[in-house]
Every structure is written in structure tokens, then in C-alpha cells.
Image (cartoon, rainbow, N blue to C red):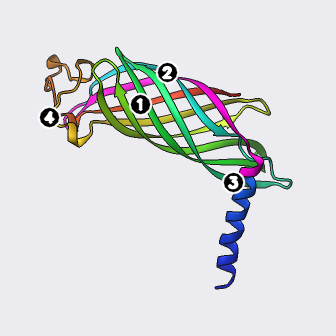
Amino acid sequence: MTRSLPISVLAVLLGTGVAHAERERTTALAVTGGYAIVGIDDDAVGETVPMLGASLAWDRTPPAYPLAPGYRWAGDLVPEVTLARIGDDAILMGGVRLELDYAQREQGLFRISGRGSLWIAPRLAVLLEDSQLLAGGEVGASMRIRSSGWTFGYWFGVLGWPADDAAAPPPDSLALAPDAGLLDRPPPESALTFLAGLTLSRAY
């Protein structure tokens, strides 16, 4: 049992290397749309606004289907840049997705086969109007549409103000409305933006 553990770890590493060699990195262009809840603090929830954007990622295709019923997994780091509009604000986001790609053959009650990805991604962002910095992250999942280069997915994210920007007030679109009985400009460290959306991408 003790000897088999290092051998198993080595086999996984070698398998991952082989999977990367078989999977060429491609450029994926995506459009995404959803909603954001901006200006959240400890006492109340802020305004809900639409979100629309486009992103460019340097991704790999999911691994090939296993020959027998089962799963095949492969890890990857995927750089991604997103230009979006949240309410009245234009925002530029960048980050690296920590991605787990998979292929499954005849799994579950309905014997489903498919390929896709799961990810978690730290994000840095800049509000283009006044150069305010934001930091946050997202989690998401996607599935390849048959054997085409199209992928459909969903994601959830959050953006918060960095602690070293605590002295700077947030922009007007992220401030809480006075008529809602809230602070007009809450401390930046307490202002959060929650996001959720759908994404459709095409690999080239």
C-alpha cells in the first residue's frame, strides 16, 4: 500500500502530461450576459443592473472521450481577459482560470456522454471611467456542444474593493441610494458586487 502511493501519483502526473500534449491551446472568444447586484454592505442589498460583456481566453479543448464508460480528467491554467458593462460602468477584468476539464462516457442514470470544464478564477478589474481597482473571483462550469467548437456555460462571481483603497470612495454607480435608507457612500471595503450570468464561446 505504501509503495503504491508514489507510483499512483507519478501515473497521474504522467497522464496529465500526455493529456496536455494531445490538447492544443486555442483562442476562445465568448459573449456573456447576466445581472449584477451592486453596492452590498452589512445592512442591505443594493441595486440590480444588467451585465453584458465579451472575453478572450487561451484555453485547451476538453480531453477525448474514454474508450470505456467512465471519466477522463485534465487540469489547466487558462488566461482570460474580459471587457464588460455593468449598469452604467465599463469594466476591464483579467485573471487566470484554475480549470478542471473532463470527458465522460455513458455516465449517470441516463448514460450521458459529454465534455466540459469546471473552474475557479481570481480576478483583478479596473473601472475604466475613473481607474478604480477591484479584486474578486468567480466559479463556473461549461459543456461542449457536441463535437463543435461551441461551448455553453454559467458562472457566479463577486468583486470587492481592495483594502489599500479604503480611503477612496466608490463610483456613483456602485454607491447605495440615500432614499433606500442606506449610506450614500459606504466604506469601499464593505461595498461588494455579486454577478451571475451565462456564457457562449467559440474556439478558433
According to the picture, the residue beneath numbered tag 1 turns out to be 195
Q: Is residue 38 left or right of residue 114?
A: left
Dot 3 falls on a residue whose secondary structure is strand
Which of discs 4 and 1 lies nearer the camera? The answer is 4
For the residues labelled 1 and 2, the Cα–Cα distance comes to 12 Å
| Mark 3 to mark 1 CA distance (whole Å) | 28 Å
Q: Give, as a three-letter code, the residue at label 3.
A: Trp
Vertical relation: 132 (above or below) 67: above
- Residue tagged by mark 3? 73
Q: CA distance from mark 3 to mark 4?
A: 45 Å
Q: Residues within 10 Å of mark 3 (few under 14, many from 20)?
A: many
Main secondary structure type of the part rendered in magenta:
strand
**Which quadrant would residue 142 be assigned to in this image?**
top right
Q: Residue at x 45, y 34 (%)?
A: 94
Q: Upstream in the sequence, badge 3 or badge 4?
A: 3
Which portion, as a residue range, is magenta? 20-44
Give the distance between the C-alpha atoms of the residues marked 4 and 2, in whole angstroms. Answer: 29 Å
What residue is pinned by disc 2?
53
For label 4, the residue is: 167
Residue at position x 27%, y 25% in the image: 46
Sequence-wise, the earlier of marks 2 and 3 is 2
Badge 1 crowding class, 10 Å Cα cut-off, few under 14, some 14 to 19, many 20 or more, is many
Q: Is residue 42 above or below residue 200?
A: below
On the picture, is 198 further left or further right than 50?
right
The mark that comes first in sequence, 3 or 1, is 3
Q: CA distance from mark 4 to mark 1?
A: 25 Å
